[in-house]
Amino acid sequence: MDTNTLHTTTLEKLYGPVECEIIRQDDKIRIVHLKDKKGVSRTVGVVKFYNTDHHPIKSVHKTIQAGGLLGKTLQQSKIDYKKEIIGAVPVRLPDWIKNDFITDEEHSMALISKIKVPDSSGKPLLYTVIIEVLPPNLSSGHVQDIIRKQDIDHDILPLFELTDLIIENIIL
C-alpha cells in the first residue's frame, strides 16, 4: 500500500477527522466533498471507476459506494493498491466549490491520480482515476509536475466538465 500519498491521511493530520459527503454517484462516477469536523470542504474529489467487479476489490468497492472514504477504505481493507500521481493542473474554481471551500480565491490546483489494484492473479488493474481539487491554501505546497490541458487523457477531461472546473494556463 502506498500510504505516503494517501490524501485522506494528509487531511486528517491538518484538520482532524474528515468525512465524505457524496454530491453525485453512480456506477462509474463519484463526486464528493471531503469535509472537516466544522463542515468545511477540504477537497473536492471527482472519481471515475474502472474494473470494479473482480476479487478482491468487489466487496471493498461496495463499501466505498456506500459512502466510505476511498483512500481510507482501501487502506483499511489491506488491499495492496498503488496510487500514481499523474500531475497537477491549475484550475479556475466555480462558485459552488469556492463557497464550500470558504474562499474568495479564483484559482487552485487539481491533482490527477490513478489507483491500481491487483486482480486475483496479482495483475494490476486500473481501479480509479481521481481528480482531487485542493483548496487554494493547500495548493501551493504541491510540487507535482504541472501538466497542460492538451496532455491530459481524453478520458479524464470530461471529469473536469462535470464539476464546472476550467483548466487554466497559469501556474499558481
Image: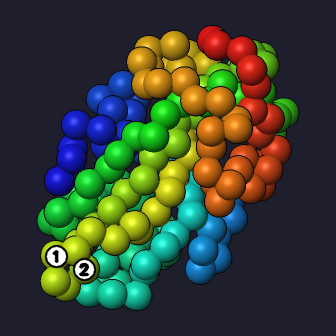
Q: Say whether residue 87 is left or right of residue 91.
A: left
Mark carried by residue 146: none
Where is residue 50? Give x, y as percent.
49, 73
- Is 113 located above or below residue 36 in the figure? below
- Is 63 located above or below residue 59 in the figure? above
Camera-nearest residue between 51 and 137: 51
Where is residue 99? Give x, y as percent.
76, 32
Q: Secondary structure at mark 2?
A: loop
Query: For the C terminus, which image quadrant?
Result: top right
Q: Which residue is mark 2?
A: 119
Q: Secondary structure at mark 1?
A: loop
Q: Which residue is mark 1?
A: 122
Camera-nearest residue between 126 and 18: 126
**In the rendered image, which quarter is residue 32 located in?**
bottom right
Where is residue 128? Give x, y as percent.
46, 63
Where is residue 60? Give x, y as percent.
32, 76
Amino acid type, mark 2: Asp
Q: Mark 2 and mark 1 in contact (Cβ < 8 Å)?
A: yes
Q: Who's the residue at 72% across and 15% down the image?
A: 170
Q: Who's the residue at 51% across and 13% down the image?
A: 140
Q: What is the C-alpha distance between the residues marked 1 and 2?
A: 5 Å
Is residue 139 visible to the viewer in this orientation of the structure?
yes
Camera-nearest residue between 128 and 61: 128
